[in-house]
Image (cartoon, rainbow, N blue to C red):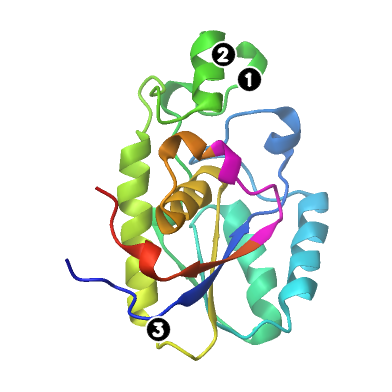
Amino acid sequence: MTRVVSRPRDIVFIRHGETDWNRQNRLQGSTGGPINDAGREQAKGLARLLWEVPLQAVYSSELPRALETASYVAGPHGLHVHTDPRLNEIHHGEWEGMFEKDLPDADRYRQWRADPSSVDLPGGETLHQVRDRAVSAMKEIVARHPDGEGLLAIVSHQLVLAVLKCYVLDRPWSQIRKHALSVASYEVITAGEGFSPRP
């Protein structure tokens, strides 16, 4: 089996700033609006925290909330933000855009919140579909940039980043919620031996 990463690589996983839908407990998924005023302040804070980190490239989901956050992070480094739809958040199917309190099957949603690998949402994207596209994007991003020239930043969403973390760290899918990043937070992950494909 060919490994994409021959030596450890540091990747900065960044979750987008707050949106109104975050506050309203609506299922954003592949829709949802841009970051709100609080989210912009959070994104500026991320930029201040990361301005001394040697970034060589910034990649983002195409969704406005991630892309705007990425633009703040990339700005101090003079970097262009590369977008990739494979980094977009999971599509929630028929429940996309609904308020959590109005969902038609509360038990199913609670189960999905506890362990997204255990149940699919009606008409929605499966966790394995998200895994396949997001991991494919991450592999290509890492292969595209030389080692030793700075960190790679990936600005994305709660579930996508948690899936990528579990993949890199070789953690079971049942732990995805445990590895979720909070709004406007970041984590540096070292991709090395654990970057081999999961069975």
Residue picked out by circle 1: 100
Q: Is residue 112 magenta?
A: no
Mark 3 falls on what kind of element? loop
Instruction: List x then y, in percent, for residue 189.
Output: 54, 65
Residue 3: quarter of image = bottom left
* Picture mark count: 3
Q: Residue at x 69, y 28 (%)?
A: 25
Give the Cα separation between the discs numbered 2 and 3: 43 Å
Residues marked 1 and 2 touching at CB (< 8 Å): yes
Left or right of 125 on screen, residue 68 = right
Secondary structure character of the magenta stretch overall: loop
In primary-sequence order, the first of circles 2 and 3 is 2
Dot 2 amino acid type? Leu
For residue 49, what is the image quadrant? bottom right
Which stretch appears magenta?
177-186
Q: Horizontal placement of 107 versus 126: left or right? A: right
Please tell me which residue lies in front, 137 or 4. 4
- Residue at image mark 2: 103
Give the labeled residue for mark 3: 145
Residue 26 lies, with reference to residue 39, above or below; the image says: above
